[in-house]
Image (cartoon, helix red, strand yellow):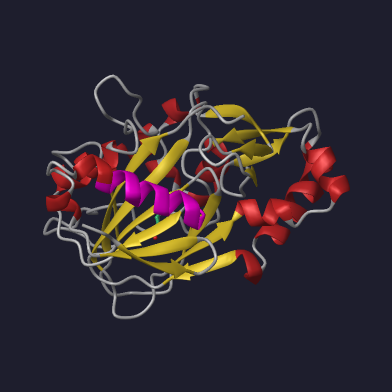
Amino acid sequence: MTIQKKPLGTLGVEITGVDVGRDLSGGNGDNLFGDIRQAWQEAGGLMVIRDQSIDQQQHIDFSRRFGPLFHDDGQPPLQDTVSRYLHPDYPQIYRVSNKVDAKGEPTGRKGAGTYWHSDVSFRDRPAQASILYAIQIPPYGGDTIFADMAAAYDALSGGMKAMLGNLNAVHDFAVAAATQYAKPVVIDKDFDGANQCVHPIVRTHADTGRKSLYVNPGFTSHIEGFTAEESRPILDHLYKHATQPEFLYRHAWQPHDILVWDNRTLMHYAVSDYAADRYMERTTVIGERPV
Ligand code: SIN
């Protein structure tokens, strides 16, 4: 069987002709997954697979083909602050939702990711792929925007590339905790050091060898060895540069989309411009240490 591919902006691919829940478990599953993964990498790190109908276990099985997941046995969990949003039966699934249940309890994290970020960049081994399945989408709004950090890197001057190539940045969950989470929700243990680390500002993709900027407003606190005042204008310049329209793709969701993004080379931003129900489930694949 062959998959159909259509470019998705300049950084992604739309895949049709595959049923993730059924076709990957057959005898040809490994070859088919190889084709899907290759299409995803060649396109630039974003992939939408349309019209899927998967349950939580099928979502997890598909995701594990990319690598181990946060909350898998023997693997680290996500930060404790989001534990209340995990699926009660499938802790690998993080629920993103503005809906409440019959008791008025949230069915997921409302407003998750409404800021530019790369998932879990505050860990030594940050997220590789995030795999978000759209179960309910509002009739209008709720798009997710992606920034191509490899194209943004390519477009920098030689002087800037040379300077950044020698620098590391500190990533810290405390940055998002202070700006994106209501105080009572944040769990103090998340500040014990496990959610803070240092990564190169320019990372090289483990599979494609392509260089990308690897800083984000959500989690990057400062450039290592620089004061906050010194690093702020440099980081702000990089964020302004990387979020120019030329480097962006805006995904307008269709029900039953599976979206796979590569956090090693993309930042994303969930647009909070809707009131109707939106319910999605995400798995997060653990990546390698950035170099
Ligand atoms: C996220 O950052 O994982 C949420 C993305 C979205 O809800 O569109």
Along the line of sight, which residue is nearer the eye, 48 or 175?
48
Q: Position of residue 227 (x, y in %)?
A: 81, 34
Residue at the (67%, 67%) spot, across then down = 244
Quarter assignment of residue 169? top right
Residue at the (77%, 36%) spot, across then down = 165
Residue at the (79%, 27%) spot, across then down = 225
Q: Position of residue 246 (x, y in %)?
A: 65, 69
Q: Which residues are magenta?
A: 32-44
Q: Determine if the magenta segment contains residue 259.
A: no
Residue 195 vertical placement versus 135 (above, below): above
Classified by dominant secondary structure, the portion drawn in magenta counts as helix
**Is 211 positioned to the left or the right of 61 in the image?**
right
**Is 205 positioned to the left or the right of 230 in the image?**
left
Quarter assignment of residue 166? top right
Instruction: Report the residue that reaches farthest toward the top.
Output: 74
Residue 97 vertical placement versus 289 (above, below): below
Which quarter shows the C terminus? top right
**Is 291 positioned to the left or the right of 275 in the image?**
right
Quarter, ligand 1: bottom left
Q: Determine if the magenta segment contains residue 35.
A: yes
Quarter assignment of residue 47? bottom left
Instruction: Report the residue that reaches farthest toward the bottom.
Output: 140
Q: Can see residue 276?
A: yes
